[in-house]
Image (spheres, rainbow, N blue to C red):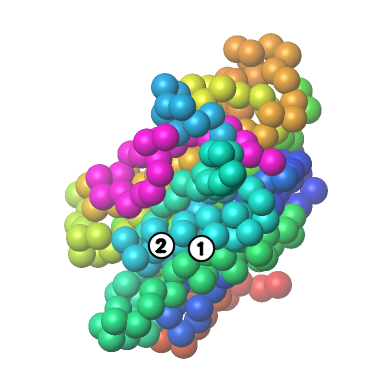
Amino acid sequence: MRPGPGNLITDVAGFRVGNASDPVLHSGVTVLTADRPFTAAVHVMGGAPGSRETDLLAPDRLVSEVDALVLSGGSAFGLDACSGVMAGLRAMGRGYAVGEQRVPIVSGAILFDLLNGGDKAWAKEAVTSPYPALGRAALEAAAVDFTLGSVGAGTGAMTGTLKGGLGSASALLPSGITVGALVAVNALGQVTAGDGPWFLAAPFEEGAEFGGLGPAPALPAAAAPLPMKRMGEATTIAIVATDATLTKAEAHRVAVAAHDGMARAICPSHTLIDGDLVFAAASGARDLHDPLTDLFQIGHSAAVCLSRAIAHAVWLASPQRGDLQPCWSERFGRKG
């Protein structure tokens, strides 16, 4: 496998990603959409998830495709971002046809960034939630090229020790199928080994995409970690995508497999306090030639891409006024 030309989830043809950020709020929204409705599924492994319209992604539900997937900050308030995305899609004439009406199908997930140093006065003063507008702005910004780091849903993200952020990665399979990952990293756990700069995802790094530091010389001895963040102050939310033709059941298996990539890149992950969740999206542009082999490789590649994307999120985080944690680059002096 090798990365796609942009090393982004949008190397999967047809998909676009948009970000909207509020640096004062220290929060934002990221939207993945496509040229047409696409197959989607979800798998949740965290103990404290926040989501909208995820039940409809089950294989036995009526709706077979969605118009967009949303990753948002803001805890439960951030679920309102999906309303903004729906409004934008409806204005574009997108959505499930019901008589003369169209109902855009939008599923989303949130992370907790309410105690990250940003100005959250709107929640105390009965001011209109900023998230619907952020969601619509992210949709309208959707493009093949997009920014990573402290943007979108990763604007105010944190991890156990360093600032989190938004990350992405892609892979081209021998079959010609493309796989990509997009992630907002706000984990309870660490993305690096001990007090050093080494990323836990280093065994899967392509070239020097997040520094080329290699694995840690020696990983710290196993210990019983303490939940340093308080309840609800965590969650890593992700999307993995492919151009393969998948059923909802097959897409669900890809989402399940992708969680392995989260566990390899964040320690600990999938905790009771995190709301870790992975969406899977399939554009259907390429038929499976060997269903067993292709699905096996798509699932494995989704996990690898997610590990790499998690490292990118922390590697590319940038400092902002009011930060409560240092960026990787501030602490370890990233060059270039």
In the rendered view of the protein, which quadrant contains the N terminus?
A: top right
Q: Which residues are magenta?
A: 36-56
Amino acid residing under circle 1 = Gly
Residue 229 appears in the rendering: yes
| Image quarter of the C terminus | bottom right
The residue lying at 52 percent from left, 70 percent from top is 134
**In the rendered view, does 116 fall on the left or right side of 292?**
left
Dot 1 crowding, Cα within 10 Å, few <14, some 14–19, many 20+: many
Point out the residue furthest to the front here. Answer: 100
SS at circle 1: helix
Q: Is residue 46 magenta?
A: yes
Question: Does 327 sit left or right of 186 as displayed?
Answer: right
Q: Which x, y percent locates residue 137?
A: 59, 69
Q: Residue at x 25, y 64 (%)?
A: 229
What residue sits 67% from the left and 34% below the top? 283
Query: What is the secondary structure assignment of the residue under circle 2?
Result: helix
Establish if 223 lies above or below 37: below
Query: Height in image: 76 above or below 280?
Result: below
Percent position (x, y) of residue 309?
A: 57, 51
Whole-angstrom CA distance, mark 2 to mark 1, is 7 Å
Q: Are marks 2 and 1 in contact (CB under 8 Å)?
A: yes
Residue underneath mark 2 = 80
- Front-most of 207 and 80? 80
